[in-house]
Amino acid sequence: MEGFLQQIVSGLAAGGIYGAFALALVMTYLATSTVNFAQGEMAMFATFVAWGLIQSGVPYWLAFFATLVLSFLGGVAIERVILRPLESAPVLSITIVTIGLLAIFNSMAGWLFGYTVRTFPSPFPQSPLKLAGVVVSPHSLGSLGVTLALIGLLYVFFRYTRLGLAMRAAARYPMASRLVGIRVGWMLALGWGLAAMIGSVSGMLIAPVLFLDPNMMEGILIYAFASATLGGFTSPAGAVVGGFLVGIIENLSGTYIRFIGTDLKLTVALAIIVLVLIFKPSGLFGRTQPHHT
Amino acid sequence: MSAPRIEWVVPAAGATDRHAIWKKAGAIGLLALACALPWVSSDYSLFQYSQVYSYAIALLGLNILTGYNGQISLGHGAFYAIGAYTAAILMDKLGAPYWATLPAAGAVCLVAGFLFGLPALRLEGLYLALATFALGVSMPQLLKYHHLEAWTGGVQGIVIAKPEPPAVLTNAGLPINADQWLYFFALAVTILMFALGRNLMRGRVGRALIAIRDHAIAAEAMGVNNALYKSLAFGVSAMYTGIAGALGAIAVQYVAPDSFNIFLSLVFLVGIVVGGLASISGALYGALFIQFVPNIADDISKAAPWAIFGVIMIAFVYLMPTGVAGAVRLLLARRKSP
């Protein structure tokens, strides 16, 4: 029973990270109806920037917030410069451009920071806690807290601020928003910036666990895809819940289903994506999308 | 205002019959060039050209799905891997002759593609991209899976023997070595697959696929069985890519899980965009691009070749949305019309 609880807790800890990153994917999707395949590499790059800052003697939290600002600006810039002209282009064009970005960021990180695996500091204490026979690392707890705080902030932002409301309106009803004076193009760019920022938070939370290298996010991207698909691509809270579920499923199936073990963990994510898309394409909490032809 | 967008290569109206003879002459010239290459190239270049043929078949397969039928696949490297492993296992474990592994790999991938295509029916655009991306990412892990290790060789992969030129030719005194023979074998397979692909896409099936891509509901109304054709497109596309994978494995004489990572799938997608979507000849241009441009990118910047690759990819979306095949067609059309 303790083993089972331990797996659930580990699953929740991993799931919090998947959820935070899935949140970034959902943000981009809500703002511009695209899936950003470069989201993981952007987060990885931002984490390297934070690492660089910390290496040069900047205190952790200052580096953390500086990275958030830089990621936000980077995300806005990418949307304005590269994706703006593709506004009404078909999915294939946009997909290819984001894959191009994936290649660029991956390669640039390797070039600027090297391919050696590096340790990344955690702002939380090191010694593991023991609660009711279950071992929890303070970093997991801290990550969980950050993820939940993030979703809370986003909820408040989108629900109670003018800007958040304008962003939601611009994403869902671009024409009507334009008529009431919302600058739709800038709202979409803000959405990208926000997504890049959330992505960099998840990158900085993952790096102490997985270690930092240019290919850090490849596996995480798939889990985040699975989380966002399970929770629904149109629901930020759903993405976080999806993240927890995926983390738990991953841990339990790895432990209790003999033939999966640690070898087929990525395949579990594939199975989740395919099954959800077959049986409930809008995910658990997503809106059903109107059918366009 | 129209946004830059990737467009399908559309045949120029009227130009085809008037200039058919020039097209034929061009094709014969190309074939002559292809046959002359083995006598003037080094063994290593020949190996590279054999790789180009293998990629060309894979790209043709992906083009059938993405270019002609409009279904995005970001995981075709997985089918390439299945084809390669089918060939390697058949040769290594069952002692099958190398030429027999190609149809086998094709059959396995046809079934695999059709089965993956069935759930894909319900997925459109982005969601299909996601599902196939996940397939591409998880493939190396499946190939390393320890319960399959007896067959796949796990992380080590499988080494396969180089095919020897048939005794009939060597006994007749033809000075042909193994690399040259492999090249001709690859060339023959490529010509066969391209001829088949061209006929398939020009006929009833091709028109049905294009109709579904352009307007699914109208196609259905005209009596096209959308579900059947879409999953068939997936199957046939996977079959082409699987045969290409088998050919590639025979050329490289080695298969290992990590050579079939997600970047292979992405490179295939780049190949068809650069070559030209919904174009048969585009597959060949794309194959030349993905075989040789990484080397050029490597020369431009040793440190970040993938960055150059990414920039080229984005540049194509903006500047040459119909790919090389579309640009070639445009140039020809301009020269012809006074």
Image (cartoon, coloured by chain):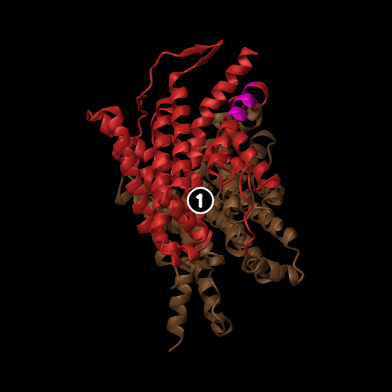
Chain colours: A red, B brown
A124 versus B228 height, above or below: above
Q: Which residue was labeled with disc 1?
A: A29
Q: Nearer the viewer, residue A237 or B336?
A: A237
Residue B163 seen in the figure: no
B334 versus A93 height, above or below: below
Q: Residue at x 31, y 34 (%)?
A: A50
Q: Position of residue B146 (x, y in %)?
A: 62, 26
Characterize the local packing of mark 1: few (<14), some (14-19) or many (20 or more) Cα atoms within 10 angstroms: many
Q: Residue at x 44, y 38 (%)?
A: A153
Q: Amino acid at mark 1?
A: Tyr
Q: Is residue A179 left or right of residue B24?
A: left
Residue A64 seen in the figure: yes
What range is drawn magenta here?
Answer: A248-255
Residue B303 forms part of the magenta stretch: no
Q: Secondary structure at mark 1?
A: helix
Q: Nearer the viewer, residue B138 or B258?
A: B138
Judging from the image, mark 1 belongs to the subunit labelled: A
